[in-house]
Amino acid sequence: MLEHIIKYGKKNINFSLEREPRKTLKISVLPDLSIKVSAPYELSTENILSKVKGRAPWITKQIDYFKTFLPKEPPRQYISGETHYYFGRQYRLKVVQATFQEVKLKGKYIFINSLQPENKTHTKVLLYKWYKFRAEEMFKMITERSNDKIKKYGIKVPHIEVKIMKSRWGSCMHSKMKIGLNIELIKAPSHCIEYVIIHEMCHFKYPNHTKQFYNFLTLVMPDWEKCKARLEKVII
């Protein structure tokens, strides 16, 4: 694959170009912020550069979208006094020596009763087991609530799978009628979680991020852009 650069305002857009036996140009913005262009053999490089430049507003929009998934803070230490988030609220971690293991909310604290309070990796494991348990419960509840907005368009309640995702908040597995949701979403406010769920449910009707997809998303959830903007500020 060959590397190319186009200028868009003050920005440089770098992309890799691959020739394929196809009829149309395809531009893909990947979660790692890289850009791949697949073009027909007969299309000139000059024509390709022109077409990519014409799609520059969309490309930069997709890059900004994927940037929201990048880490916003240094790695957590999982020690007492450290700030962590749950369901849109900020809590202090309190790691306590105990003869049993349990994680619970109490006031402004997330208490972690642990057999190994000095073991940071163990503390992280306990916290994320609790996050996953709460996420499975809350995401299911929000999905059922979201269904009231979308069921009239023929979309059924999908199966929810909570998992670790490095580059996105959610994913849609159309053939399995399943939505994958990032465990980190449990740190976001309820309306942000609902936005991601509805976003993924809309993909059952429109698989790609086309104009039709965004029109449909707006129809189902008129304030989705506000929710997305709020989600971009979530600290994970």
Image (cartoon, rainbow, N blue to C red):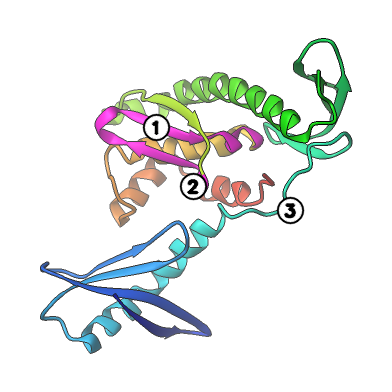
Q: How many marks?
A: 3
Check disc 1 and report the residue beneath it.
Answer: 179
Q: Is residue 198 magenta?
A: no
Label 3: element kind: loop
- Distance (Cα) linking label 3 and label 1: 29 Å
Binning the other alpha carbons within 10 Å of mark 1 as few (below 14), some (14 to 19) or many (20 upward) gives many
* Distance from Cα at disc 2 to Cα at disc 3: 19 Å
Q: Is residue 187 above or below residue 18?
A: above
Q: Residues within 10 Å of mark 3 (few under 14, many from 20)?
A: few
Calculate the distance from the C-alpha at mark 1 to the C-alpha at mark 2. Answer: 12 Å
Magenta segment = 166-187
Residue at 38%, 68% (x, y): give it.
35
Q: Residue furthest bottom?
A: 46
Please provide percent x and percent y for residue 173: 32, 35
User: Which residue bears the numbered disc 3?
Assistant: 74
Q: Nearer the viewer, mark 3 or mark 1?
A: 3
- Residue 199: image x %, image y %? 42, 41
Amino acid type of the residue that numbered disc 1 sits on in the rendered structure: Ile
The answer to whether 224 appears left or right of 6 in the picture is right
Say which amino acid is labelled 3.
Pro
Q: Please tell me which of labels 3 and 1 falls first in the chain.
A: 3
Say left or right for 120 vs 65: right
Foreground pick, 146 / 70: 70
